[in-house]
Amino acid sequence: MTHDAKPPAQPEAPLEPGQYGQFLKEHGIATTRLADSCGIETIAIQAEHLPSALKLLRNSQEVKLDLLITVSGVDNNETFDSVYHLWSYSHNNELVLKVMIKKTDVPEGKLPMVPSISNFWSAANWHERETYDLVGIRYSGHPYLRRILNPWDWEGHPLRRDYKQPVDGLNDKNPHSFR
Amino acid sequence: MATELQNVDLKTDEMIINMGPQHPATHGVLRLILTLDGEMVRHVEPILGHLHRAQEWQGQNRTWFQYQALIDRVDYLSGMFTSWAMARSCEQLDGITVPRRAEYLRVLVSEMNRITSHLLWLGTYLIDLGAMFGFPFYPFREREKLLDLLEEIAGQRMMFNYIRIGGVQRDPKADWFQRVKKFTDEFPQRIDEYEAIVTENPIFLKRTKGVGILKQSVAKDYGVTGPCIRCSGIPLDLRRTKPYSVFPELKFDVITYDKEGDTWDRYMARILEMRQSNEIIKQCLDMMPEGEIMAKKQMAGMRIKAGEGFAAVESPRGILGCYVTSTGGEKPFRFRWRNPSFCNLSVLSELLVDSPIADIMAIFGSIDVILPDVDR
C-alpha cells in the first residue's frame, strides 16, 4: 500500500466563489472553493447543508444540474471525502461538490457520517452503498445501506489507505499456500 | 346430484424466487431476488458483487503503465472505450495533446468496437427471448470480420490495450484501411438481413412492443444514460453534447428513437446506431491525416502530473467516466469509474414492477448491461 502517497495540494489563499458558489451563497449556503479539477468548478460544502444544496442545484431553472454522474468516496490522508459529480441533461453545466470530513472529527471505531441524498435522488442509492462498502462513509437516512460489491459479512473497507488484505497473494512467500 | 360450482376463495401469497447468479440470460453473474404474486413481479432486488475484482483497488496499487492493461477487462465488450476514458482523464491532467492521426484512429477503432458490442447484444438478445434457431450466427459473422481486423491492429480480439495515455499503440498498414473500407461497404446490407428477420417479426413485436416503458422523469432520477435515455426523449449523446476528440469534425446525428420509450425502441436505436457507426467509420477513413500516433513515451515508470479530473466517453451502454486523482507519484492516488451499466441497472427495480416474469428478460436485455462493468 502506498502509505506515503499524499493528495494533491490545495491552494493556500481562499479563492473567489465561482458561478455555482455564488448561486448557493445567494440561497444562504456557504461554500469554500477548491482548486478547479481540470477546469471544472470544485466546491467544498458542509455535510449538513448537502441535501438542501443539491435540491437547489437540481431544481433551479438556470442551474439545472440534474444528472448525478457519480458519488465517490476518497480516503485522503487527513480527510474522508464524499465527492459528487453533477452534470446536466439539458444544459452544458458541470460541477464537483465535495463533503470533506476530517479524520480527527470521527470518533474512534465509528464511521464518518454524511446525510444521504437517495431519498430524493434515486441515482445516488447504489453509489452511496458502494462508497459505504469500499471507503466506509456512512450515509444517514439511506433506506438500505448494505454492502453492494463485497459480500455482506466482509470486514474492512478496501479502498482505505490502511486496509490490510486478508490474503496478500502478491507478497506471499509461503511455498505451501494454495495457488 | 348436480355438481355445484363453489366459489372457492383462494388465498394467494407472494412467492420469493431467486433468479440466481447462474443464468444463461443475465449476461454475467447477476442475482435477482424476485417477489412474485402469481406471474407478476412485485419487487425485485438485484444483488451484485459476484464479479467484483477490485479494479478500483488495483487502480491504487498498480503503476500507471500496468493499470492501462487491466481496465480493458472492466467492460470487455467495449474495451476501447474504457481505455479511452482513462487516457482522456490522464491526458487532461498531464496536459498532453494527442496527435490528430491518433485521434482519428481512436474514433475509428472505437466505432468498430461499438458495432461489435451492438452485434453481440443483438445476437444474445434474440436468444434471451427464446429465438433458438441460431440467429446469432448472422451478427457474429460480421463480428468475426471486425474482430479479425481489430486483432491485426491491436494484437487481441477483445482486451485490446490499444488506446494508451497519449495516443494509440500501433499504426496499421495501408491495406488494413482498404479491408475496413470493404467491410463498411458490405455492412449495410447485412444489417438489412438482420432487420428482415427481426424488426417486423410478429413474435418479436408481441414480446417487445409496449414492454418496459421507461418514463423520462424516472430515467433522469436514476441517472440513466446511453441508448436507454435517448429512447425516452432526451437527446444526451456525449459525442454531440460535450464533444471530445475529433467528433466536431464528423457529420452524424444523435439517434433518438422515442416513439414510446419501450423495448422495441431501444432495439431500433441500437440498429440505427450500428448504421451510424458505419458512416462514421467511412468518414474517418476518408479524413485520416498523416502524422505521429503517440505523444507520451510508454514506459514502465511513467507518471502523470498531480491534480484531479474527470473525463467521460460515450460507450455503447452510456456515459463511461473516470475520476482520477494523481499525486505525481508512480501509482495513481484514486481511480473511480463511473460505469454506465451500474447506473442503468439500478432502474431495473422500477421497470420490472407489475410486469410478468416473461418480460424480465426482454426488459433486462434491452438495457444492455454487462456484469463486469457493474461489479468492476
Image: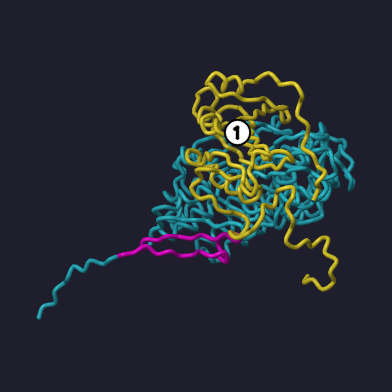
Chain colours: A yellow, B cyan
Q: Chain ID for label 1? A: A
Observer-nearest of A88 and B204? A88
* Dot 1: element: strand
Residue neighbourhood size for the residue with mark 1, other residues' Cα within 10 Å, grouped as few (<14), some (14–19), many (≥20): many
Residue A178: percent from left, percent from top: 77, 72
- Whether residue B314 sits left or right of residue A170 in the image: it is left
At 53% from the left and 40% from the top, the residue drawn is: A116
Q: Give the residue number, with chain letter if any, for mark 1.
A: A86
Q: Is residue B14 magenta?
A: yes
- Whether residue A68 sits left or right of residue B283 in the image: it is left
Looking at this view, name the residue that lies furthest to the front: A108
Q: Is residue A31 magenta?
A: no
At 69% from the left and 44% from the top, the residue drawn is: B336
Residue A15: percent from left, percent from top: 71, 20
- Image vertical order of residue A160 relative to residue B100, above or below: below
- Image vertical order of residue A97 relative to residue B356, above or below: above
Quadrant in the rendering for residue B95: top right
Observer-nearest of B326 and B145? B326
Residue B146: percent from left, percent from top: 72, 53
The part of the chain drawn in magenta is: B12-38
Residue B201: percent from left, percent from top: 47, 55
Q: Quadrant of the N terminus of chain B?
A: bottom left
